[in-house]
Image: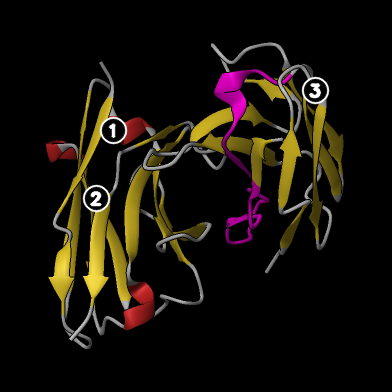
Amino acid sequence: QEQLVESGGGVVQPGRSLRLSCAASGFILSTYGMHWVRQAPGKGLEWVALIWYDGSKTYYAESVKGRFTISRDNSKNTLHLQMNSLRAEDTAVYYCARDPGGREIDFWGQGTLVTVSS
Amino acid sequence: DIQMTQSPSTLSASVGDRVTITCRASQSITNRLAWYQQKPGKAPKLLIYLASSLETGVPSRFSGSGSGTEFTLTIGSLQPDDFATYYCQQYNRNSPYSFGQGTKVGIK
């Protein structure tokens, strides 16, 4: 069946870096746009980044622009989020999510927790 | 960027009640709006897309309406499984995606 499995979360000090990965299975990743969406503890959903199906375009929330980089490897069915210069306010569960093409998010992973703390 | 404002932030209702949640966009998004349901500790689940299209497998008691800047999610007869938090999301072309702040539906 279709699955999105995030990995790479953990505890990291402010100012350090972390790379999240998302492994896709059960569907052809290369036909979908992909997002990262995060949720701080007890808070609402915040859209973080989008990458087109072929990796040709990327978009970022203002809160992460210049610090985070979304990328994908369709040959390995994986999505990544490189997070640099992390701040306490980046603490959240990070979800990878699928988009049929500039549209709604129709499928989500279960999320990975990132905690930024000294 | 487009701001999405949901109301109310919380509501209390009983099983069988008709529930309506409103979402307003800071500028027109035509019909490029989705609704999601999220339960504690779980990923969100798509309910409605393109403002009024029901996702496959979602019960017909859920419905969406609206266009431009005003949208509503209606649960026709609230069931025990529907107590959750609901989010709207806009996906207007050439704009960053954004979510509403959420509406928590609790038991009266």
Label 2: few (<14), some (14–19) or many (≥20) C-alpha neighbours in 10 Å: many
C-alpha span from label 3 to label 1: 40 Å
Q: Residues within 10 Å of mark 3 (few under 14, many from 20)?
A: few
Mark 1: give few (<14), some (14-19) or many (20+) Cα within 10 Å: many
- What's the chain of the residue with tag 2? A
- Please state the horizontal and vertical placement of residue A14, each as a whole percent of the image: 22, 86
Which amino acid type corresponds to the residue marked 2 in the rendered image?
A: Arg
For the residues carrying marks 3 and 2, which lies nearer the camera in this image? 3
| Residue farthest along the front direction in this orientation | B108
- Residue position for label 3: B17
Q: Are marks 3 and 2 on the same chain?
A: no
Dot 1 or dot 2, earlier in sequence: 1
Quarter that holds the C terminus of chain A = bottom left
Measure the C-alpha gap from mark 3 to mark 2: 45 Å
Q: Residue at x 66, y 55 (%)?
A: B100
| Chain of the residue that carries numbered disc 1 in the rendered image | A
Asked which secondary structure carries label 3, the reply is loop
Q: Respond whether the residues carrying marks 3 and 1 are from the same subunit.
A: no
Whether label 3 touches label 2, CB < 8 Å: no
- A29 sits to left or right of A44: left
Q: Range of the magenta residues? A: B78-103
What is the distance, in whole Å, between disc 1 and disc 2 at their CAs?
9 Å
Residue drawn at 13 percent across, 57 percent down: A8
In contact (CB < 8 Å): disc 1 and disc 2: yes
Residue B24 as seen in the image, left or right of residue A15: right
Residue at the disc numbered 1: A29
Question: For numbered disc 1, what is the local secondary structure?
Answer: helix
Is residue B29 placed above or below B27 in the rendered structure? above
- What chain is tagged by disc 3? B
